[in-house]
Image: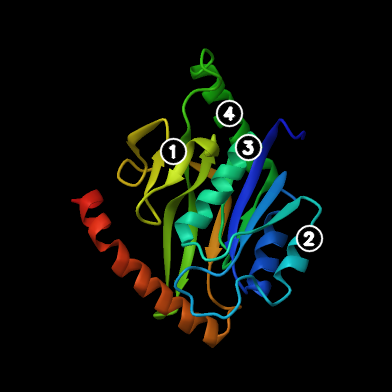
């Protein structure tokens, strides 16, 4: 890996989530070239500090292939866009999107083999324009929800990006668009294909009750603020 050629990076947003962040980074650090962590209070979080006051920064800096970035008072999509911008600056080829309340189980051989197949396909089809257009791929995720503790949701979710520097979240936190062609929308168009060899797991098991209470309040305010944009996108 060189500064000019980062094959696979991961983007993570976090705030005061030391335990979850450690679990997340430990699960992926052997399989990615770079981990980009965006720390900072989420806008609408009612906290008196802008950056994590637990050991989040120390956790990030304990991994040699990580970078710690401070961007407080941003919404979730604004923070995600920060690591997409960073990925563009570093010429990252593939980006894994994973949150601090998630961890990955990775079969390194299978995952990298499938990643290489995707890359070869893009390079073959886009040989005249540097590897073709940006793209989005689905990864299987199992999700536990605090509201339904006995229910686990299984689905594929848009979490692997090809040429991530060409993507941005827009209007709502799940609306992903191609900056070179804004009408190309991966929220309604979904991912191009699924990639195997990696599975994500989401839960709140390592978060305190106080954090969960604040998080639920934040999500409620976020969804209220996105109602008009959601109607426009999905109707």
Q: Which residue is mark 4?
A: 119
> Where does residue 5 sit, x and y in percent of width and height?
70, 31
- For residue 193, the mark is 1
Query: Which residue position is annotated with label 3?
Result: 89
Q: Earlier in the sequence, mark 4 or mark 1?
A: 4
Q: CA distance from mark 4 to mark 3?
A: 20 Å
Q: Is residue 36 above or below residue 135?
A: below
Residue at horizontal 68%, vertical 51%? Answer: 35
Mark 4 Cα-neighbour bin, 10 Å: few <14, some 14–19, many ≥20: some
Q: CA distance from mark 1 to mark 2?
A: 34 Å
On the image, which quarter does residue 109 sit in?
top right
Q: Answer with mark 4 or mark 3, whichever residue precedes in sequence.
A: 3
Dot 1 or dot 2: first in sequence order is 2
How many neighbours does mark 1 have within 10 angstroms: few (below 14), some (14-19), or many (20 or more)? few
**1 and 3 marks in contact (CB < 8 Å):** no
Read off the residue under disc 2. Answer: 61
Q: Position of residue 63 (x, y in %)?
A: 79, 57
- As measured in the structure, the alpha-carbon distance from the residue carrying label 2 to the one carrying label 3 is 21 Å
Pinpoint residue 45: horizontal percent, then vertical percent: 48, 75
- Chain-order first, disc 2 or disc 4: 2
């Amino acid at each position: 890996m060189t500064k000019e050629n980062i094959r696979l990076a991961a983007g993570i947003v976090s705030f005061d989530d030391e335990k979850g962040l450690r679990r997340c980074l430990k699960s992926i650090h052997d399989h990615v070239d770079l981990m980009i962590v965006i720390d900072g209070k989420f806008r609408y979080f009612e906290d008196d500090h802008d950056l994590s006051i637990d050991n989040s920064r120390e956790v990030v800096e304990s991994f040699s292939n990580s970078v710690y970035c401070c961007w407080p008072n941003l919404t979730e999509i604004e923070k995600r866009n920060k690591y997409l911008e960073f990925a563009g600056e570093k010429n990252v080829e593939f980006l894994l999107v994973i949150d601090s309340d998630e961890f990955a189980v990775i079969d390194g051989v299978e995952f990298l083999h499938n990643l290489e197949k995707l890359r070869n396909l893009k390079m073959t089809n886009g040989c005249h324009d540097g590897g073709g257009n940006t793209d989005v791929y689905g990864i299987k995720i199992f999700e536990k929800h605090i509201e339904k503790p006995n229910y686990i949701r299984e689905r594929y979710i848009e979490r692997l990006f090809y040429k991530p520097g060409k993507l941005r979240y827009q209007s709502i936190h799940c609306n992903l668009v191609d900056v070179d062609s804004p009408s190309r929308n991966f929220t309604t168009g979904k991912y191009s294909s699924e990639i195997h060899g990696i599975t994500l797991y989401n839960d709140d098991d390592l978060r305190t009750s106080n954090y969960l209470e604040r998080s639920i309040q934040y999500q409620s305010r976020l969804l209220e603020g996105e109602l008009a944009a959601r109607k426009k996108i999905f109707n």
